[in-house]
Image: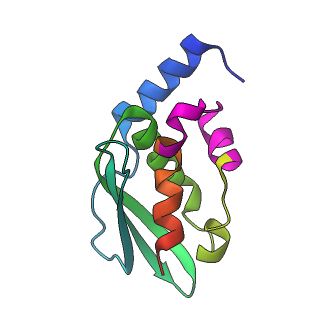
């Protein structure tokens, strides 16, 4: 795992870039969820053809952890089969982020996975 200063710098870089932030023109599926413990709320939009995620974007607002989590998740799931993408776990997100999120922030980290799992 990375040191705190490197971790914070990398998270802030991802947060400022917000990869895949916006709305899809050709979305086929979407889901929205609000974190009940805070003001984080995101919509995940997917373009799925024959069970494969061709593109993914998100929009909404949230803290650094939830925003970075949904950003790296959208990047990861492009090209994946929807059913396989729904099998991603906290451990997978930790790996994508390069850190393990502290227990008090796990709901922020997992919001993106919860949205994904609810998409039909």
Q: Is residue 74 visible?
A: no
Residue 11 to residue 6: above or below? below
Residue drawn at 28 percent across, 44 percent down: 39
Q: Which image quarter is the N terminus in?
A: top right
On the rendered structure, is 74 left or right of 98?
left
Residue 72 to residue 1: above or below? below
Q: Residue furthest front?
A: 37
Query: Residue 13 at what x, y percent from top left?
Result: 43, 27
In depth, the one of 14 and 92 nearer the eye is 92
In the rendered image, residue 11 lying in the magenta stretch gets the answer: no
Q: Is residue 18 visible?
A: yes
> What's drawn in magenta, residue-wise?
91-107
Query: Residue 29 at what x, y percent from top left?
Result: 39, 78
Residue drawn at 42 percent across, 75 percent down: 47
Q: Residue 46: name its quadrant.
A: bottom left
Q: Residue furthest bottom?
A: 50
Residue drawn at 33 percent across, 46 percent down: 40
Colour scheme employed for the rendering of this structure: rainbow
Residue drawn at 57 percent across, 83 percent down: 51
Query: Residue 117 at what x, y percent from top left?
Result: 54, 69
In depth, the one of 26 and 88 nearer the eye is 88
Mainly helix, strand or loop, the magenta region?
Answer: helix
In depth, the one of 81 and 34 nearer the eye is 34
């Amino acid at each position: 795992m990375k040191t705190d200063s490197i971790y914070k710098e990398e998270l802030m870089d991802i947060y400022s870039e917000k990869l895949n932030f916006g709305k899809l023109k050709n979305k086929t599926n979407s889901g929205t969820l609000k974190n009940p413990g805070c003001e984080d709320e995101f919509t995940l939009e997917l373009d799925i053809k024959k069970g494969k995620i061709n593109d993914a974007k998100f929009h909404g607002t949230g803290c650094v952890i939830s925003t970075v989590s949904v950003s790296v998740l959208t990047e990861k799931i492009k090209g994946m089969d929807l059913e396989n993408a729904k099998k991603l776990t906290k451990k997978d997100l930790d790996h994508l982020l390069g850190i393990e999120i502290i227990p008090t922030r796990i709901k922020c980290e997992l919001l993106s996975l919860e949205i994904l799992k609810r998409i039909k």
